[in-house]
Image (cartoon, helix red, strand yellow):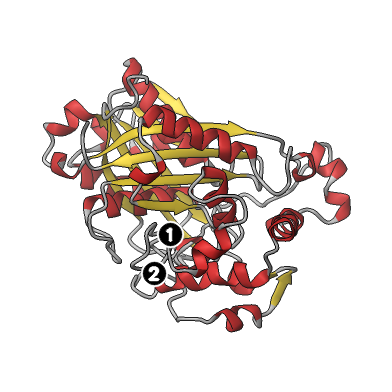
Amino acid sequence: MTSMHGGDIAVIGAAETDEIGRLPGMSVLELHAQAGLNALRDAGLTPADVDGLATAGPMAIEVSHHLGITPRWLDGTMIGGGSFMLHVRHAAAAIAAGAADVVLITHGESGRSGVGAAPFRPSPSGPGGQFQTPYGAVTPYSTFTVPALRFLHDRGMGPEDLARVVVAQREWAAKNPRALRRDMVTVDEVLQGPMVSYPFTKDMCCVVTDGGGALVLTSSERAADLPSGARAVHLLGSGESAESTLVSQMEEVGSFQAFRRASAEAFATAGVGHADIDHLMAYDAFAHLPLYMLEDIGFVGHGESGAFVAEGHTGPGGSLPTNTNGGGLSYTHTGMYGMFAIQEAVRQLRGEAAAQVPGVRTSFVQGVGLFFAAAASLILTNQRP
């Protein structure tokens, strides 16, 4: 165990933009700034207290300059939607090493309105442009289909198991006034929805929104001296891993080795086991991802994820409350969802969530990046070890 774990690093500020959804009046940079200032206010700090900044999307120096921050540590790691889990891990290491004292991690994305957002243009010269794009594997929903179908086939499962993930998470979203999709649905309604790319119907795909969020990290020792110290959330363990940017080059299509490796390291560094986890945030750009994560992280065995969801274990009152904000499928998804998964974990650990689960002491946050290319895991707690 390194000094960046074991309660030595704390999330002392966490906040999202004032609104999420459709925000055509705010640019990407403005979303970063509003989220960052909200998180600093939550921490009881100001930009003058920050000496480290991490982000993905715009360059970190653009955000730091816009906020009037003069950093001595910067991180622009970009692995897609799970980048912010890596930023937490990297910021913790920087604070533990003395490279920074207070780190601000920001996210802002105009995924729906496209204000100030760079257009997505896959490079024709890269591996994907040469070996996947010509076959139609360009968008997330067309790239995830083959692994999802392989996963279902190998386990004797079907689209109805994907639909049950949607139904379970909609139960959480119905309790959350900020969630974009709050109407309850049935398995049949999900299956009968418009087909996007087989086997994904519309509700099996994430929403598309504008919004942002930010986190403030510092040492647990310093956090204890701040007015918000009683609400500090501590980093118990973390892990990261990567495979190929080409889905066709996955070691095993029906299981993601980066999930397995990152989560195993998170448990090893945290010094806890699966039975110690009270709450799970599983990055859900599409409905198959929570099923992969339940199995690859080790919460259930091979082929048991569908039944686990069907039996209500991930929903309200279940043994492993999962995606309690409604997830990317129902709450929000700006294009990179990882920040919002961490935000909900922090809210649950603080006892401030819209759909609060009683007695949450530990939360596991699992991220994914660039389809099945990278993964990052965090284990957070409200108990300073």
Q: Position of residue 380 (x, y in %)?
A: 33, 40
Q: Which mark is residue 323?
A: 1
Q: Is residue 14 above or below residue 201?
A: above
Looking at the image, is mark 1 or mark 2 earlier in the sequence? 2
Question: How many labels were placed on the picture?
Answer: 2
Residue beneath the point at 42% across and 58% down? 322
Q: Residues within 10 Å of mark 2 (few under 14, many from 20)?
A: many
Q: Secondary structure at mark 2?
A: helix
Q: Residues within 10 Å of mark 1 (few under 14, many from 20)?
A: many
Residue beneath the point at 47% across and 70% down? 168
Q: Is residue 26 above or below residue 74?
A: below
Q: Is residue 338 above or below residue 171?
A: above
Would residue 106 be seen by someone viewing this image from the given angle? yes
Q: Secondary structure at mark 1?
A: loop
Q: Which mark is residue 172?
A: 2
Which amino acid lies under the numbered mark 2 shown in the image of this protein?
Trp
